[in-house]
Image (cartoon, grey):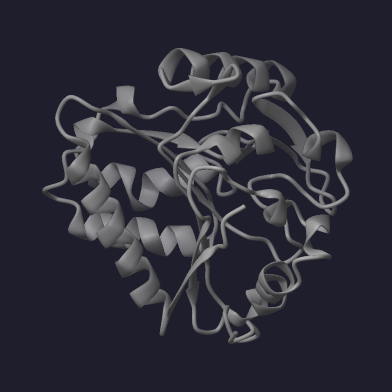
Amino acid sequence: MKNPDIKIFNSPEKLVQALCDSFIQMISKTGQSNTLHVALSGGSTPRVFFEHLAHVGNNVPWQNVHFYWCDERCVPPDHPDSNFGMTKKYLLDKIDISDQNLHRIHGEKDPTVEAERYSHHLLESITKQEKNYPVFEWIILGLGEDGHTASIFPGQEKIIRSTKICAVAEHPQTGQKRITLTLPVINLADRITFLVSGKSKANIVAEILNNKKINMIYPAAMVQSKQNPIEWYLDKEAATLLKSD
């Protein structure tokens, strides 16, 4: 297992600017004949990332990019809790991208049926596959203060051990149903990036990145790749408690 690639920036703005630069560079390298399949996450830091990407993405060849979602709350797309709705508001409505390139999870549908539909859709849309799982070129993840990522929460062994492509999860406090990519799918991605900012995330970042022996109680620590090091894009506040060695 390769050591994580930790990048620390002085502010959330510098963090998302660097990620935008990397994103645009990756799209540019893709070429006209290739497609970049990217899975996005919700949350406040991704929102800032989307805003900045919309601002600088006028000349990006968006026809080469297909967007998917790591997870979705079981709500309609126009609901304030919708990850797709947030992405649409801050990014998709502001760039020149075809609806055919947007592969949302239908949060308004029956979650069990939708998890199955989205699983089949991913296999139909993403030609690169391994062991009957779709392989994304890039997955961008968030990190919860409890160590969850996507909608894979600590202690939910059925989801953590799932071998499906998508699973139905439940928020441990609110009971809200969610649909999420599973760890086998996430771990197969060519590139995996955690995007984390704020002092409230400092403890969990340190728990995961400092304490190698005990961190496996957290789903985010179970994100591992045989392809490339896991990237951690952190602002200075989120990285406050990291060991320097």
Q: Is residue 90 left or right of residue 56?
A: right
Q: Is residue 125 left or right of residue 29?
A: right
**Near-viewer residue (43 or 126):** 126
Is residue 241 placed above or below 173 in the rendered structure?
below
Q: Is residue 13 left or right of residue 236?
A: left
Residue 22 point in image, percent of width and height: 29, 57
Residue at 65% across / 74% down in the picture? 201
Image quadrant assignment for residue 105: top right
Residue 15 point in image, percent of width and height: 39, 72
Residue at 71% across / 50% down in the picture? 222
Q: Is residue 163 visible?
A: yes
Residue 179 point in image, percent of width and height: 67, 33
**Near-viewer residue (222 or 180):** 222
Q: Quadrant of the C terminus?
A: bottom right
Is residue 76 placed above or below 234 in the rendered structure?
above
**Near-viewer residue (206 or 105):** 206
